[in-house]
Amino acid sequence: MQPYYLLQESLLRRNLSLIRRIADEAGVEFILAFKAFALWRTFPIFREYISHTTASSPYEARLAFEEFGTKAHTYSPAYEDDTFDTILRCSSHISFNSLTQYSHFVSKVKEQGPEAPSIGLRINPEHSEIETELYNPCAPGSRFGVLASQLPEQLPDGIEGFHCHCHCESSAEALQTTLGWIERKFGKWLGQLKWLNLGGGHLVTRKGYNTPLLVSILKDFKNKYPNLRIILEPGSAFAWQTGPLVSQVVDIVENHGIKTAILNVSFTCHMPDCLEMPYHPAVRGAETLEDAAETGAATEASVYRLGGNSCLSGDYMGYWRFPNPLKVGDMVIFEDMIHYTTVKTNMFNGIHHPALKIEKLDGSIQTLREYHYEDYRDRMD
């Protein structure tokens, strides 16, 4: 059996329906961040619920314009001269990361006349709700965003919006705190703007998320600043818990009493966030054991580390206790592997890439994409 990611349409529509309801109740717009989900063959489903997407590169901007069908809200740490025409053609909003980038490109934006994208600045409120340093865009010395101390009293000509990103799988309470920091640092400029993009990381589809509080916070903020159109661009929230990565045991090896089930997938290739964040993914039917080595549970008959099929020494995680001892050919199913994972995969070692599949509402399974040797070869062409 070849591995595959399985997106479940019913779960995707569940999330989309909730996001649409929140947007309608709060009077704000939610847009899809491609950095977390870019399975473009599912865009017809998304278009039933949302109207726009967000991009961070020329390729993502093209995906928005050419495949989703609307121009992107685009932000990049740095735009390049030789691809900025693509950004202009495919974007309705362009946020600049620095005043130097704004100065360099503003005349080119204005040359577009009535069709010119709305210009924004990314701001850094010097506060973040993100604990993992790797994902913290507001850490001291961050390369992201303009500080309040760097802005003049009157915003530079043509700037219509602020873009801010301070969250990662965060709560409504975290947003409430962040808005306080935005007002404290940037409040004197909010009256000069037309829109405020609150970025991603708002995990509104997570169980227990306080959606009534979120709606209340957003309504109150809009009442305070009626000139502002409020935009949120979560990525994880759209595809949160919408499907697994299905793999198979290829071999089982043992060393010093530790059994490792080697799979036909790889953590470093197909689940990179597990190693980067890091976090232990849920495995269907298995119990995660954080301290198995210390407690001696690692030597139990049905406890295994799970190893990837690459030659990276650290391409493994563990431990899990399964209902029964594993054997070659058994399926191992990693839950919640659609958001971020599907866009961050790679072909290191030339390992076979999992297929992309969708389970339709009627229970049928459609293959969206299969990968072959030529996909690996042609990346170096």
Image (cartoon, grey):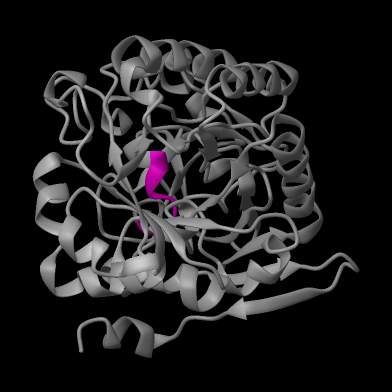
Q: Is residue 79 visible?
A: no
Residue visible at 69% across and 71% down in the picture: 44
x%, y% of residue 220? 63, 16
x%, y% of residue 235? 52, 46
Q: Is residue 246 visible?
A: yes
- Quadrant of the image for the N terminus? bottom right
Judge from the rendering whether residue 367 lies leftward or rightward of residue 232; answer left or right. Answer: right
x%, y% of residue 11? 77, 50
Q: Is residue 170 above or below residue 114?
A: above
In the picture, residue 60 is in which quadrant? Answer: bottom left
What segment is highlighted magenta in the picture?
A: 269-274
Judge from the rendering whether residue 150 lies leftward or rightward of residue 113; answer left or right. Answer: left
| 44 or 157, nearer to the observer | 157
Q: Is residue 162 above or below residue 33?
A: above
- Quadrant of the image for the C terminus? bottom left
Judge from the rendering whether residue 333 lies leftward or rightward of residue 249; answer left or right. Answer: right
x%, y% of residue 161? 37, 39
In the picture, residue 208 is in which quadrant? Answer: top right
Q: Is residue 65 above or below residue 132?
A: below
Query: What predominant SS class does the magenta segment belong to?
Result: helix
Judge from the rendering whether residue 244 lies leftward or rightward of residue 138; answer left or right. Answer: right
In the picture, residue 353 is in which quadrant? Answer: bottom left
Residue visible at 30% across and 70% down in the picture: 112
Q: Is residue 270 magenta?
A: yes
Residue visible at 32% across and 33% down in the picture: 135
